[in-house]
Image (cartoon, rainbow, N blue to C red):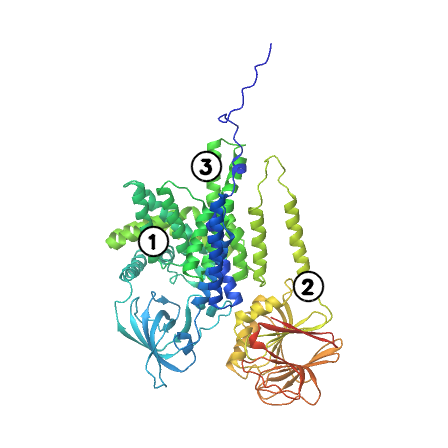
Amino acid sequence: MTNPSPAPASANAIQEPKPLSKQLRLPAFMPFFWLGIATVVGAFLAHSLKLESKLWLIATGISLTGFVVDTINRHRHQRQRKLSVFLILTSLCLSAFLYTNSLPKKAPQYINYYNDKGTVNFSGLVVKPPHQKRNAIELTVRVGSIKLVQSDENAQSVKGLVLVEVPLGNDYNYGDRISVYGELSRPPEGHTFSYRDYLFHKGVYAMNQYGAVRLMSHGHGCPVLRALYALRERSKQVLQNNFPNPESALLRGILLGDESGISNQLAQDYSRTGTSHIIAISGFNMAVLAGVISATLRRRMERLRGGLIAIGVLGLYTLFVGGNAAVTRAFVMSAFAILGSSIARRGNLLNSLGLSVFIMVLINPHLPWDIGFQFSVMATLALSLFATPLQAWVEEKLQKRISEEKARQAASFISEYFLITLIAQVLVLPLIIYHFRQLSWLFLLANPLILPVQPLVMILGLIALIGGLFFIPLGQLLSWLAWPFVAYTNKVVSALARLAPNVWHLPSFSAWWLLVYYALVFLLAFRPNLKSSDKPIWKPIFALLALGSLVIVSAIHLAGKADGNLGLRVFSISESPVLLARTPKGEFVLSGGSGDSTSLAEHISKALPAFNQKIAFVIVPSCKKADLNGFYGLPEQIKIDQVLWGCDPESSRSAQTLYSYFEAQELNQLILDEQYLLSWEEGEMAFSFNETGLGRLSILHGTFSGIVDYTLEYSPSGTEDLSLWIGQADTRASCAQIMLNTSNKPHEELDDCPSTFVQLSQRDWVYISTDGKTVWLSGR
């Protein structure tokens, strides 16, 4: 008996399907994803390099020309579809040009010119809804004209935004034209983050606090926005009347994007449990709303028309809630998804994300500095890369134990309420640690417990709000349907926060480590596909990546080791000298705290070894307020052994406050005198004083001698020649080999002194290293 011969192979033959997790591949062509990355990189490059905008414009023209030529050649030779590198360069250079072109100029036509120029009288338009803080109301005003009170000149037309603070109880609205009499100043710095930089990237370069504000007229601005903002205010009142607090406050955040009603304690609970994304309008809220609107409209009208109406409704809702970066990103992606579904064209999430970023950054090149934008983009990127593969992996494992349909349902539930949270944290968690330097494990419990009810919270809360807008008793009745789920959310978050009230505080680290981490993640995600799925999962690339990471870490660690030389790094933070000294044994001494706290902490953290963020001694030379601001927040990011006061901390209110702040940080503090020395082998650091505090810091190491001059009066150091003198141009030392001027004024060169003159204001920092005999000078 012969066996039947096998059937011939056929293209239509049914083959056994491969496991789903092995069928997943990244899209082969996703141009907007790479163009979106290019626009973000271009904005950061423009911020770092500080080149003129015309140079970026020229580079854009050259890149665009190269793209046109490359496109013609590709069309002529009928090459395969591929993203041109010239188009990527064009996007990068265009983004850089738009960023540099958006920066204010120091000229009378720009509002920042009038900071600290005395009393002014300006008029302008309130261009955003008033923001209520704990002790004031903030008005964002686009200034039209300004006049210096002490000047005889007429009012000058100007450009720019001013943040005007008025006392609580004032009633101003979007579209009001107001007149303000008072002084303008640069926005203040925060203790834990740079409030000034935050406002800078929002386009606000000046601030007025409690000036004399007069209402000139109502009803200006965009009529559509006026109507939306008026509806938003009425919606707040409906939620406050129909829901008890804190449920009303939570719904105001979820539905209206208004977090002002949430108490400090509840906000901390949400932050500690890693559920702050619930409070604010985010991609999750927009996804729920988009799904409800699309499903409702498609049942009543044809697909394309319903999709366009859905996009219009989502756009109005985006404006209604304030249009922050996360909401706008979610709207753009939702619009593309709805439009693609309406015309039966299926896109991919990476391309949609890239297109959203591309459009938004070109419209506002300061968006990459928005923390909400960073979190939103990174969370979406993580879900785009890893959500489907992990869900498929879970489904594949479950199919070995239960039926295929039950495995699919279970995997979907696990992915939606547990895996998605973990996946988003893959790219968001490093950002949280970088910005806030704290971490809690509670997000692992909190998100699976409260995420399942959030669609009900939003949908039922929105129904109750709409009902209350039409008929108050109806809204009160409907509010009882939504209240249990809102209350459950608050109760679970507060209960979990009490389980672990302390978070893990982490040291500050350089943004370069973020880039290294994301580079490794991207290498793993975009590694070349295997030709055969039968090959083992482990590949040499993983070993190379691990080895490369180990080499980088080891190199940085070794670079931070003491080299036996004395190192002096002087920062261009303020005109008063700020010095970070490194002894031959590797101990660090910081002298000076001028400038803002965020800038000082960032400069110091970058200068310290990555794995040894520690300062042995912090010296406070002066008790003036301007010389103390930089110290705030420093102990929270960098370990400090001892604080040495070169002035009397009781001499000013600002010094008393800083002394109490150091006490709260449990730092050892000591008041210096002239007998105190910081010594090391072959060297020492000595102190001399004047009436106000530390006058000079003398540094000796072998034959090297240097002086850091904190006084503003002429007082020659002696007849001996110095190796180094550091101070402002208004002071004069005897001849030194290196004269380092920390002020913006040019230093008067001495004819009989063959010195190297260095203007610190033209650099970020200057580094002097010596072995006691030879001196090396470098900087950036």
The residue labelled by disc 3 is 409
Which amino acid type is shown beneath numbered disc 2?
Ala
Q: Is residue 623 visible?
A: yes
At x 58%, y 69%, the residue is 603
Q: Which residue is mark 1?
A: 315
Res. 171 image quadrant = bottom left
Residue on which the image places disc 2: 559
Number of other residues with Cα within 10 Å of mark 3, as a class: few under 14, some 14 to 19, many 20 or more: few
Q: Secondary structure at mark 1?
A: helix
Give the percent coordinates (x, y) of residue 173. Answer: 30, 67
In the rendered image, residue 255, in percent from the top left (x then y), is placed at 35, 55
Q: Is residue 526 left or right of residue 171?
A: right
Eye-nearest disc, 2 or 3 = 2
* Mark with earlier residue (2, 1): 1
Q: Earlier in the sequence, mark 1 or mark 3?
A: 1
Density class for disc 1 (Cα within 10 Å; few <14, some 14-19, many ≥20) is: some
